[in-house]
Amino acid sequence: MKREIPLMIVFVAGLFMAVQFFVPHATSEYIYEFVMEWTIIIGIFALALGIWSFIKVAASKIQRRSENWQYSIVALAGLAGMIIFALPWFGGLESYMFRSFFNNVMIPLHATMFSLLAFFIASAAFRAFRAHSALATVLLLSALIVMLRFNPYMGPLGDIDADIASWILNVPNLAAKRAIIIGIGLGIVATALKVILGIERTYMGKD
């Protein structure tokens, strides 16, 4: 029963969520909204679990003096500071310290991460766009045409390039995106059926 009850709950919940989509009734919609509200509760527990896991991993690094363990102290101090300064006694989310940490630490960190990501993307594009085959050559030329449409010094060629770039984005690129979305949708349906039918049980942990 330890494994059968969770599988039964998943089966009933998954089957109901699939069937209610095709039942246009007020009762069905009410139950659907009621069930969806539980996802907020689950999200709160997931957040608490994530915080606990983060604290546990950071504390373990500090205790074992792992490589760069000093950063774990900074991370824990930052977590504690953001939580404390967000309490109502310190002004809540609009307190001076909370906004200062957010505006002067979090936002620059996000900007730094996105800046580093741009270099990784450029490096990956350089390796992918090498014209070592016919398909890679087509990809390279398409990328150049799309990027050149943002160049203000193209002159009269800018309008022609913009038309070609728009065609590339709206015809072959959009067709590829739709194919990928269809594939993702089919994968989601297949995975959902495996979970509902009890074939996929990794969410239950180790056997």
Image (spheres, rainbow, N blue to C red):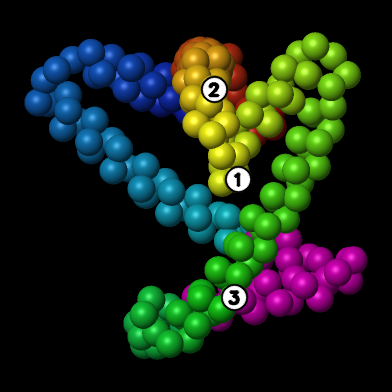
Split into 4 quadrants, where in the image is the C terminus? top right
Task: Residue 153: give its label.
Answer: 1
Amino acid, disc 1: Tyr
Examine the rendering and report whether any part of residue 16 can be seen: yes
Determine the secondary structure under disc 3.
helix
Does 73 sit above or below residue 184? below
- Which residue is at a point 84% across and 14% down the rendered structure image? 133
> Which region is colored magenta?
54-83
| Magenta stretch, overall SS | helix
Q: Nearer the viewer, residue 30 or 162?
A: 162
Looking at the image, residue 92 sits to the left or right of residue 202; the answer is left
Residue 199 percent location from the top left of the image? 58, 14
- Which residue is at a point 68% across and 31% down the rendered structure image? 144
Task: Residue 164: give its label.
Answer: 2
Amino acid, disc 3: Val
Amino acid, disc 2: Ile
Determine the secondary structure under disc 1.
loop
Looking at the image, residue 152 sits to the left or right of residue 35; the answer is right
Q: Earlier in the sequence, mark 3 or mark 2?
A: 3
Q: How far apart are the alpha carbons under marks 3 and 1? A: 38 Å
Residue 181 percent location from the top left of the image? 50, 19
Residue 171 percent location from the top left of the image? 49, 15
Can you tell which quarter of the image residue 130 is in? Answer: top right
Q: Are marks 3 and 1 in contact (CB under 8 Å)?
A: no
Does 79 sit above or below residue 157? below
Task: Residue 105: give its label.
Answer: 3
Q: Farthest residue to the left: give it.
A: 26
Determine the secondary structure under disc 2.
helix
- Residue 62: in magenta span: yes
Q: Earlier in the sequence, mark 1 or mark 2?
A: 1
